[in-house]
Amino acid sequence: MTDRPKKVTSARVLRTERPSPHLVRVVLGGEELAGLPVGEYTDHYVKLVFPPDGVTYPHPVDLATIKREYPAEQWPRLRAYTVRAWDPLAGELTLDVVHHGDEGLAGPWAARLRPGDEVLFTGPGGGYAPDPTADWHLLVGDESALPAIGAALERLPVGAPAVVFVEVDGPADEQPLPSPGAVELTWLHRGDRPVGTALVEAVRALEFRPGRVHAFVHGEATFVKDLRRLLRVDRAVPRADLSISGYWRRGMDDEGWRSTKPDWNRQVEAEEAAVLP
């Protein structure tokens, strides 16, 4: 995965949409978006910059300067969000933000946005796009992975086979995911079960196709860990053919998850190495 240097880009909200009850689609524009290096990957992401209430930064915003000159309580919080779409001709960048009422930071913020509001972000970063030489594709995720899954499906070669499992709260959270590929899309409704339970069951029961699979599995860290073991150990999918990461972890805010994620990853890799040939 690659990251663009930590330049802070200033954009303006052009409009917001509600493609489903728990999703806010934010469309951004502005002169600073010109030449934004989006397009190589389908999991491009930016990190939204949230100053604390009552704090404003001089423009252009520079994170290194802020951390050097401002007290820690005035440093911004960052939240990573996948780019759902980028239209370089119109200069429009689209982000989808999960919204569950007053829960979290970015969801309530996105629900309050109005045209003309300023949005600050760093990036983009990214590292995955569907491999056109793969025999088939497997894409698995919860709502947090839905923008990347949607972008990946749009990038598939014509007729490319793909099996897709997406877990959402319920039927109202489903949305169209067009693709030129031959896609078998299954929406899984969570109900009152823990996030990812239905995804693990679905992938475990899946009859794998012959040939080389290119897999994308992202979302809540607990189910991602279970699926990583299933794919790497039980299904012997090579690491190079698997894009897999915990975007978030139940019971932790983003800062907490980012601080513990390196240790989490090392533990998962050690457990994996202990059982792989």
Image: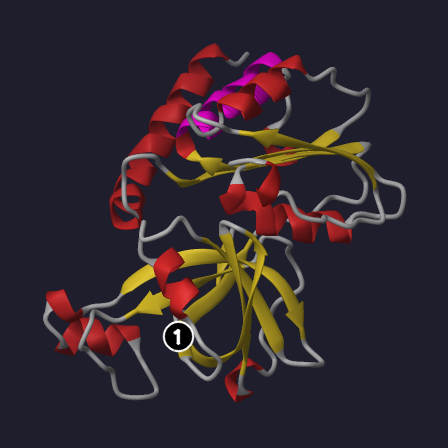
In which quadrant of the rendered view does residue 41 lie? bottom right
The reply to whether residue 8 is visible in this rendering is no
Q: Residue at x 49, y 28 (%)?
A: 191
The magenta segment is 222-234
Colouring chosen for the image of the structure: secondary structure
Q: Position of residue 64 (x, y in %)?
A: 26, 73
Q: Residue at x 28, y 73 (%)?
A: 63
Position of 176 with respect to 274 (left or right) is right
Give the vertical position of 2 relative to 211 (above or below): below
Q: Residue at x 46, y 26 (%)?
A: 223
Position of 144 with respect to 250 (left or right) is right
Give the vertical position of 121 relative to 211 (above or below): below
Of 4 and 43, nearer the camera is 43
Q: Position of residue 273 (x, y in %)?
A: 45, 18
Residue 232: in magenta span:
yes
How many C-alpha atoms fall within 10 Å of the one at disc 1: few (<14), some, or many (≥20)? some
Badge 1 element: strand
Q: On the image, numbered disc 1 is attached to which residue?
A: 120
Quarter of the image for the C terminus: give it: top right
Q: Position of residue 154 (x, y in %)?
A: 75, 53
Q: Position of residue 99 (x, y in %)?
A: 43, 52
Q: Main secondary structure of the magenta part?
A: helix
What's under tag 1, amino acid-wise? Leu
